[in-house]
Amino acid sequence: MTKPKLRFKDKNGNAYPEWSQEKIGNLTKIYDGTHQTPKYTDKGIKFLSVENISDIQASNKFISEEAYNTEFKVKPEVNDILMTRIGDIGTPALINTNEQYAYYVSLALIKCSRQLLPKWLVQAILSNSFQKQLYKRTLHVAFPKKINKGEIGECIVNYPCLEEQEKIAGFLSKVDELINECEGEVKDLEEQKKGLMQKIFSQQIRFKDSNNPYPDWEEKYVNEVCDISTGKGNTQDKEDNGIYPFYVRSPIIERSNKYIFDGKAVLTVGDGVGTGKVYHYVKGKFNFHQRVYKMSNFNGILGKYFYYYFSTHFYDRVKKMTAKTSVDSVRLEMISKMTILIPCQEEQEKIAKVLSKMDELIEEKKALLSDWQQFKKGLLQQMFV
């Protein structure tokens, strides 16, 4: 059995015993949730599924206590683990309150034996070695993909003595606290930016030239202040090691070895993942998909100001217009006939500068978050085999 690179020692500086190896099904009891879509109630027992795994206490779905007692013979308890097994595979959450929970078939309930500390097993599940086993045993041809609870039980876990489990879990929990704190700071900054943008563009906040207010804002259509076009690229233009950014029909930025535009532009996705909601402010050479819209050649408006205004208002416009039809993609008219409020250039510059500073703070915090996440990933690789 391969040994982990990073080990803890006891209080006397002595090495702990060698790790043991066993199927997880022999060290735990594994159950799945109800296979029936429940009848929801306004209050009662919280009902959990895959989308709730990141914050199980935040679920706003409930079933009656009567349904809970009838349908759930095995109930989640403190220190049990819920793990996603349909759609998303292998994301665990430790139950750390006495609150009662009902759960859907998309989640597995794991109850540990005395040989495993639940808080240690959560970290073990997140490790690369365990995730690889889950991946191999997942039914990828199913839609959505899934792993049967029996296959979860066949996965092998290498585990140390309880005292070393305690030290590993305690150390990694401290790192998780730092990651969660950083995630909270990113979320807070993004909410602050959102609130600031709403106040600026509703003109609750106005900038001044020394002590004098700037002129009233003008209202124009988007097609009066810029050119609008779609790309010519398709997915075949993607190159893993391409030189230029390639903006496609999803939030992911791909790469390409050719560019079709060089300059300042605002981009939005025309259909696919993130329709009308994914925005990019781009400067330089890039390629973009035929279902991505580009706004460029700005006239009487700063590209960065346009970006902030457009990204604040356009998605709501898309939702309103698509609600009236069966159209689930962006049409040119949605963009061209959208109105935009335009302050004088000096006020545009001040608005863009303030919001750019907010973006810089957010990106700095996201970079720190990414560093902590990579640090945690490295620790898992060294502590688990």
Image: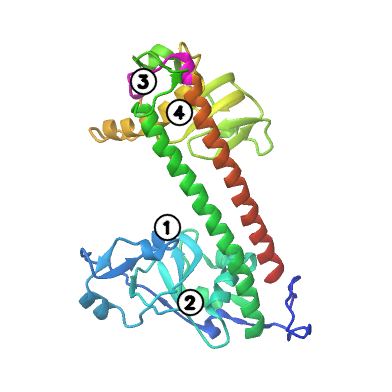
For residue 83, side relative to residue 172 (left or right): left
Residue under numbered circle 3: 340
SS at circle 4: helix
Callout 2 crowding tier (Cα within 10 Å): few <14, some 14–19, many ≥20? few
For residue 130, side relative to residue 271 (left or right): right
Residue under numbered circle 2: 150
Q: How many marks?
A: 4
Please report whichever mark, 2 or 4, sits nearer to the chain's N-terminal start.
Answer: 2
Residue under numbered circle 4: 308
- In the displayed structure, 81 sits above or below 330; it is below
Quadrant containing the N terminus in the rendered view: bottom right
- Marks 1/2: CA distance? 18 Å
Magenta stretch encompasses residue 344: yes
Q: Nearer the viewer, residue 64 or 239?
A: 64
Q: Which residues are magenta?
A: 332-348
Please report whichever mark, 4 or 1, sits nearer to the chain's N-terminal start.
Answer: 1
Please report whichever mark, 2 or 3, sits nearer to the chain's N-terminal start.
Answer: 2
- Marks 4/1: CA distance? 36 Å
